[in-house]
Image (spheres, grey):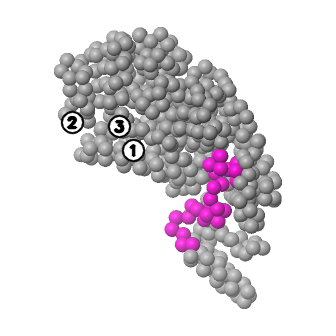
Amino acid sequence: MILQLYNNRVREKQAFKPINAEGVSIYVCGPTVYGPAHIGNARPAVVFDVLVRLLRHLFPKVTYARNITDIDDKINHRAREEGVDISIISERYTQKYHEDIGVLGVLPPDIEPFATDHIEAIQAMIQQLLEKGHAYEAEGHVLFDVSSDPGYGTLAKRNRDDMIAGARVDVAPYKKNPEDFVLWKPSTEDLPGWNSPYGASPGRGRPGWHIECSAMIAQHFGKTIDIHAGGIDLQFPHHENECAQSRCAHGAEIANFWLHNGMLNLDGEKMSKSRGNIKLIDALIDDYPGEVIRLALLQGHYRQPIDFTASLLDQSARMLDRLYGLLRDNPEMTEAAHERHADVPESILNALCDDLNTPKAFAALSELSRHGDTVEGRAQLLSAGAILGILQQSPEAWFQTGGDGIDAGKVEALIAQRNEARVKKDYASADAARDALVQMGVVIEDTPNGTIWRVARS
């Protein structure tokens, strides 16, 4: 089956062919760990998690890297506020990021490079750029000379005038060109830094943001990788600058395919700090199971903006309730389906191989659920869920998620009390037990296989 991906470098869908048929290399820009991650950070993590799952199904080996930016002015600022080393901040929020996206079913990467572990590689790449005339020193800084790269702007499809107007850069007097960007900058004693050879009086300094990813990719993969991915907000200037420095240092493009996910809006508005509408992942997890949030993030095509609303989340919860409800009915058949280990259905693969078309995949999943009255049908449903990262828990566990503080033992005791009262025709006591369950936020259902329960969803 041919995988077609929209390559943002050329602005068209292309058949994906890896550099090495035996293995695929993919790098996704990860978080800057200065605070808890928001739901916008979760979209690329979830979207490209599905891509990696698909690649692992299609190719014998996939090496997936997602970096951690652990040196940044925002991290420095928070560390200074708390009076601690930057490592305390970065370790705290790296762990928090892992926890939050783990709840969303995101698998860990094969490689998770930290910027501060790659200072030597960063400095070596800067030295290459200096020696080849693509960078220059000025007042203790090292800057990339944009005018030295004829290909600059080809990823974002911008001319230099647009870039000068649109790039968020400080036009320092020591820059040759307004759009030149920092590769290395000096550090005062109150800031983190590493010894460097740069400046009239060589001393401590720290890397610029853009050089970090280029150096980490070069160290772990070599000059060129198959796929580089991230949010569309990173296309310029971050990814454009990555392309420039890697092209000029190594004489090769950093990636053959560039994939960018669209922006996430909250209730029709762009999410931003200035609007005060940042929604943290952990706040959403308090209100919705992680699997609901994951499904909601995949409801739209990854390249398009997505309007993230309560309605979308509720719709996703209902879809999962229906699918898990099907699997809960006749548990013996579901158990047999787990043992069957069906191949991923062709309808699901066709959708995902069409530029990761998850809406089309979910339509195919809905069609598969129509055949859930057979072992084979359920086995296909489960294998489809696995590649999408859903339907991986037991139906019982699913229907009992989302109820903070609910004592499962007490629920079971009340259900037993109700059923015993019904046998004795003590309907007042049976109703009292049901009312107590309702007060706990529990919904019960009498089935031929006994009474089952689930957490009530708002």
* Vertical placement of residue 421 versus 214, above or below: below
Give amino acid for label 2.
Asp
* Vertical placement of residue 386 versus 11, above or below: below
Residues at circles 2 and 1 in contact by the CB criterion of under 8 Å: no
Q: Earlier in the sequence, mark 3 or mark 2?
A: 3
Give the number of the disc on residue 35. 1
Q: Is residue 185 magenta?
A: no
Give how far apart the Cα atoms at labels 3 and 2 are.
Answer: 20 Å
Q: Earlier in the sequence, mark 2 or mark 1?
A: 1
Q: Earlier in the sequence, mark 3 or mark 1?
A: 1
Task: Say which residue appears at 68% left-offset and 26% top-offset.
Answer: 15
Q: Residue furthest front?
A: 22
Task: Say which residue appears at 73% left-offset and 34% top-offset.
Answer: 1
The residue that disc 3 covers is 117
Instruction: Classify residue 411 by image quadrant.
Output: bottom right
Q: Residue furthest bottom?
A: 424
The residue that disc 2 covers is 190
Q: Position of residue 41 (x, y in %)?
A: 50, 40
Q: Is residue 388 magenta?
A: yes
Give the number of the disc on residue 360. none
Q: Nearer the viewer, residue 223 or 275?
A: 223
| SS for callout 1 | loop
Q: Position of residue 384 (x, y in %)?
A: 70, 48
Give how far apart the Cα atoms at labels 2 and 1 are.
Answer: 21 Å
The C terminus: image quadrant = bottom right
Give amino acid for label 1.
Gly
Give how far apart the Cα atoms at labels 3 and 1 are.
Answer: 20 Å
* Vertical placement of residue 40 versus 432, above or below: above
